[in-house]
């Protein structure tokens, strides 16, 4: 990769460019053995069809792929390859794949065989339906017993599986064009991946109610097949709208509101580094510092003393985020934390409290862990921290908040986080998670009404894994799911992702948005082993400083002709524009009054621009 590419992604490791496969009006991108962006007549039918193998911590194997054979032409394509996974104790699994397509049918079949036996949480096909244009629309679901339901894709995010015991699902792609996806070889079910901020509905093999991990027996083949069938009853000459126009048109929208406050998280491990970087903290001037406190991790008086020192330097507000152990009665634990805070003179403006165990996900079919009633936890917090605002929700992700609805009547605010690398970590998937954010915020508002609402810390690297025993170490700086470090956090990719995140949640009237720490692997300042072209500051610094400076000001929404590629919002006489892609984009802003007439601009990959419309 070039130096410029390193500045974009924070790594010299290149993603493999997909191979475009075409069969008449049907097309798909082949990447790492799986299909992405399956389109018919230019319209996305499926976001992906993948064959995935997951380990006991729900980490995804990256198989070695051999003997790839691709043939396409005469309105058809065909692909063959063999993928190899190697697990603990030299366990092995080989998957033989054949993909074949004509204009109206695509078949993806795979046979897995292990000579040793192989432990896995999931092994088989995963089908992703896009959410934009499909959420809330009609669907026909055929079940394994042959029964058929006429139903709809969920609009508000479903906490549990909307469809179970599936054999096939059909939806409308265009007027007079439908697509049936048939799954053979096992029982499939669907989950609403917007829970995890994935921009898809995911249909996967092996119901979660069955035990996991499980063992694939040695020398017993596992065969599955996916068949996508397109029914097009239009006149043959009918075509989809011309998508060749690449200029992106931005226009003033009819939405408006107030920009959220911006927070920065401070952990005990980084508190002293934050003290050393006090000048940068003053430069950013965030409205909120979010201090993380977890007694189960050994946090105690020393951490609170450091927090008090940081808070003394900060002109804004502070919140203490407590992962309550719940090993003793909540009243006793909260009283002890309050005593420690008093001893060191730490007086935050708010407490965000949640049982530590609620950071772990409870998937369908799993037993809910022992936990005191949340009403008892909140009552104890009000007693111990009298006079301080008490917030609740989840210290993990929206998934857990959606599945364990908290009693909000005694809470001053609701909070949760998101993370974009739970299921996939390629560049496209990460940036597409921004599409899911408006669905998440609308679902929160549907549940909790106008309760004050905070989001974060939400970063590309994962700070805690609710779905396994650990986050994944990433010493090579690769793009891997559930990693506690991600190279793109050092590049302009993270700068663009953070601004896109802020734009996508504006409609929800967020009270506070936290997108980073100041230092460390989630921070705005790079360590010595993480060089950037901005000196010691990561490009993300620019986004957080911009948003902090705009906090409390009025915003007006903008519409984009290609919202997956460019977004914008207006603050006063300035339009803030964002390129979400790795390609230069031509942006037309001529709709923004007389000062912008005839104006267009070229926006570099993953870059932002603030355009003044003042005459």
Image: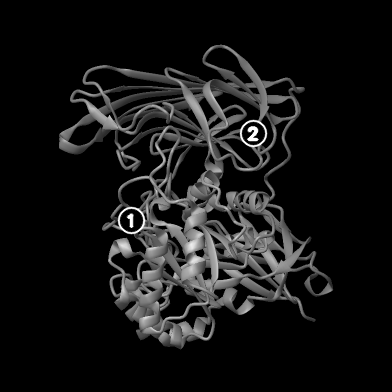
In the image, residue 600 sits, relative to residue 423, either above or below, namely below
The answer to whether residue 238 is left or right of residue 491 is right
Residue 218 lies in quadrant: top left
Comparing 105 with 299, the one in front is 299
Label 1: few (<14), some (14–19) or many (≥20) C-alpha neighbours in 10 Å: some
Q: What coloring was used for the rendering?
A: one colour
Q: Where's residue 62, x and y in %?
A: 32, 41
| Residue with the most extreme right position | 594
Helix, strand or loop under label 1: loop
Comparing 585 with 202, the one in front is 202
Comparing 480 with 322, the one in front is 322
Q: Residue at (23%, 24%) from the top-left corner?
A: 114
* Residue 493 seen by the camera: no
Q: Quadrant of the C terminus?
A: bottom right
- The residue that label 1 is drawn on is 327
How far is mark 2 from mark 1, CA to CA?
41 Å
In the image, residue 271 sits, relative to residue 446, either above or below, namely below
Q: Where's residue 521, x and y in %?
A: 36, 67
Per the rendering, the mark at residue 530 is: none
| Residue with the most extreme left position | 89
Q: Quadrant of the N terminus?
A: bottom left
Give the mark toward the camera: 2 or 1: 1
- The residue that label 2 is drawn on is 153
Residue 389 lies in quadrant: bottom right
In the image, residue 217 sits, relative to residue 452, either above or below, namely above
Comparing 536 with 445, the one in front is 445
* Residue 22 seen by the camera: yes
């Amino acid at each position: 990769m070039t130096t410029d590419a390193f500045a974009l992604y924070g790594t010299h490791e290149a993603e493999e460019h997909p191979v475009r496969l075409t069969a008449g009006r049907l097309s798909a991108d082949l990447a790492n053995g799986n299909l992405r962006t399956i389109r018919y007549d230019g319209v996305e039918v499926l976001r992906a069809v993948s064959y995935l193998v997951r380990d006991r911590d729900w980490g995804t194997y990256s198989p070695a792929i051999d003997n790839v054979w691709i043939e396409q032409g005469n309105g058809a394509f065909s692909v063959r390859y063999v993928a190899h996974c190697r697990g603990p104790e030299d366990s092995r699994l080989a998957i033989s794949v054949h993909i074949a397509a004509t204009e109206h049918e695509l078949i993806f079949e795979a046979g897995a065989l292990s000579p040793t036996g192989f432990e896995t949480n999931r092994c088989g096909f995963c089908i992703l339906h896009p959410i934009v244009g499909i959420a809330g629309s009609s669907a026909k679901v055929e079940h394994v017993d042959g029964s058929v339901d006429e139903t709809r894709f969920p609009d508000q995010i479903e906490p549990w599986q909307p469809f179970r015991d599936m054999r096939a699902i059909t939806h409308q792609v265009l007027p007079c064009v439908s697509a049936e996806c048939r799954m053979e070889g096992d029982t499939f079910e669907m989950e609403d991946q917007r829970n995890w901020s994935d921009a898809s509905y995911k249909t996967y093999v092996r119901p979660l109610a069955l035990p996991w991990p499980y063992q694939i027996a040695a020398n017993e083949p596992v065969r599955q097949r996916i068949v996508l069938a397109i029914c097009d009853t239009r006149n043959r000459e009918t075509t989809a709208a011309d998508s060749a126009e690449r200029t992106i048109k931005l226009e003033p929208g009819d939405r408006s509101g107030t920009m959220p406050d911006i927070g920065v998280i401070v952990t005990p491990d980084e508190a002293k580094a934050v003290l050393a970087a006090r000048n940068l903290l003053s430069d950013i001037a965030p409205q909120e510092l979010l201090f993380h406190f977890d007694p189960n991790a050994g946090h105690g008086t020393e951490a609170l003393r450091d927090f008090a020192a940081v808070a003394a330097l900060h002109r804004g507000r502070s919140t203490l985020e407590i992962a309550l152990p719940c090993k003793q009665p909540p009243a006793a634990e909260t009283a002890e934390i309050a005593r420690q805070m008093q001893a060191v003179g730490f007086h935050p403006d708010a407490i965000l409290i949640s049982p530590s165990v609620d950071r772990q996900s409870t998937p369908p079919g799993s037993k809910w862990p022992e936990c005191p009633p949340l009403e008892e936890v909140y009552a104890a917090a009000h007693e111990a921290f009298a006079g301080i605002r008490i917030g609740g929700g989840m210290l993990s992700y929206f998934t857990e908040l959606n599945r364990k609805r908290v009693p909000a009547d005694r809470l001053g605010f609701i909070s949760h986080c998101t993370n974009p690398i739970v299921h996939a970590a390629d560049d496209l998937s990460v940036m597409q998670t921004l599409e899911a954010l408006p669905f998440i915020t609308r679902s929160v508002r549907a549940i909790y009404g106008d309760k004050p609402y905070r989001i974060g810390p939400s970063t590309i690297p994962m700070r805690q894994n609710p779905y396994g025993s650990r986050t994944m170490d990433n010493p090579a700086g690769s793009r891997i799911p559930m990693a506690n470090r991600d190279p793109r956090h050092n590049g302009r990719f993270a700068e663009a992702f953070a601004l896109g995140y802020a734009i996508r949640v504006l409609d929800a009237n967020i009270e506070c948005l936290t997108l980073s720490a100041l230092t460390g692997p989630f921070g705005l300042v790079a360590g010595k082993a993480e060089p950037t072209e901005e000196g010691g500051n990561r490009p993300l610094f620019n986004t957080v400083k911009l948003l902090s400076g705009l906090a409390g000001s009025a915003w007006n929404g903008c519409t984009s002709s290609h919202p997956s590629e460019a977004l914008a919002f207006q603050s006063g006489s300035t339009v803030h524009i964002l390129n979400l892609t790795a390609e230069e984009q031509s942006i037309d802003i001529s709709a923004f009054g007389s000062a912008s007439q005839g104006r267009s601009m070229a926006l570099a990959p993953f870059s932002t621009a603030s355009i003044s419309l003042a005459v």
